[in-house]
Image: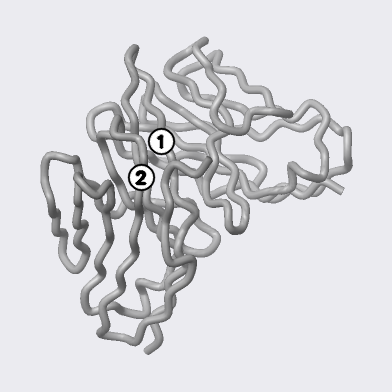
């Protein structure tokens, strides 16, 4: 059962365009929603994250939009650059009782930004 | 420099030959975890550890073992590797303050 559904699987954008990646979740117990960026040959690294008490978070060219009622969140990359070409993973985190931290990742989106 | 270090980075082995992938972090994080990354499947958690001597199964624990005898180290053990364990493996530790996961650079394992 896929708890976090990510789309699209791949995305090609022209330089300067807007890249949009979407994620949907089912479990309303998720309470933290990070996005990770992974370059070839490297491990994923945190890009930006949001908690469900806000609807939007912006850091530079990267914005997370969060819709709690629809159980969806998305990553927007404004003015996309070739250096943004990477794989992006959304995640939903559940903080269980006893301090357990349970992350569930989407399947990833391969973004290519053409110069 | 804050980092998570995995070894080996690349390994080719044969079915049934026990192997260990080591993971070490220098950030004094309590939480550590192992993931495997497969094309089209994303990152799937194998095992995690909330602290020393405390480990628990993730989503895909079959065929793997872990141990957490020291805070900084969290080795992944494949007692009898099989070809379906051919994958890219990542170790991660988590900051308790920020919730951020810090990943190693990955270990690409091929089981023939």
Residue position marked by numbered label 2 in the rendering:
A25
Please report whichever mark, 2 or 1, sits nearer to the chain's N-terminal start.
2
Residue position marked by numbered label 1 in the rendering:
A103
Q: Is residue A48 left or right of residue B43?
A: left
Q: Quadrant of the N terminus of chain B?
A: top left
Q: Chain of mark 1?
A: A
Mark 2 against mark 1, which lies toward the viewer? 2
Q: Residue at x 49, y 12 (%)?
A: B54
Looking at the picture, how far across and down is residue A29, in whole percent? 30, 30
Question: Element at badge 2?
Answer: strand
Callout 2 and callout 1 share a chain: yes
The single residue placed furthest to the front in the displayed view is A70
Report how far apart the C-alphas of labels 2 and 1 lie in the structure: 12 Å
Q: Is residue B84 left or right of residue B45?
A: right
Q: Residue at x 64, y 28 (%)?
A: B61
> Residue B27: in sight, yes or no?
yes
Q: Chain of mark 2?
A: A
Looking at the picture, how far across and down is residue B10, in whole percent? 70, 50
**Callout 2: 10 Å neighbours few (<14), some, many (20+)?**
many
Q: Is residue B7 left or right of residue A65?
A: right
Q: Relative to A53, say whether B54 is above or below.
A: above
Instruction: Determine the image quadrant of residue A74.
Output: bottom left
Looking at the picture, how far across and down is residue A31, in whole percent? 25, 34
Q: Residue at x 19, y 51 (%)?
A: A67
Query: B97 or A8: which is nearer to us?
Result: A8
Query: B90 or B62: which is nearer to us?
Result: B62
Looking at the picture, how far across and down is residue A51, in whole percent? 19, 40
**Callout 1: 10 Å neighbours few (<14), some, many (20+)?**
some
């Amino acid at each position: 059962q896929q708890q976090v559904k990510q789309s699209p699987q791949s995305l090609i954008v022209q330089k300067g365009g807007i890249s949009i990646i979407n994620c949907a979740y089912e479990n309303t117990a998720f309470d933290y929603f990070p996005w990770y960026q992974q370059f070839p040959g490297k491990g994923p690294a945190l890009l930006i994250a949001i908690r469900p008490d806000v609807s939007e978070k912006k850091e530079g060219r990267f914005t997370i939009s969060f819709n709690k009622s629809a159980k969806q969140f998305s990553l927007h990359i404004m003015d996309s650059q070739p250096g943004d070409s990477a794989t992006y993973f959304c995640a939903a985190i559940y903080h269980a009782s006893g301090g357990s931290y349970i992350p569930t990742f989407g399947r990833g989106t391969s973004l290519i930004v053409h110069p | 420099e804050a980092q998570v270090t995995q070894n080996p980075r690349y390994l080719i082995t044969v079915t049934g030959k026990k192997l260990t992938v080591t993971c070490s972090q220098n950030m004094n994080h309590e939480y550590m975890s192992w993931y495997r990354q497969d094309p089209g499947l994303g990152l799937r958690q194998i095992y995690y550890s909330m602290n020393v001597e405390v480990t628990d199964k993730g989503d895909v624990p079959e065929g793997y073992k872990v141990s957490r005898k020291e805070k900084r180290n969290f080795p992944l053990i494949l007692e009898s590797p099989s070809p379906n364990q051919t994958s890219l493996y990542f170790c991660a530790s988590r900051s308790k303050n920020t919730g951020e996961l810090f990943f190693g650079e990955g270990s690409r394992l091929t089981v023939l």
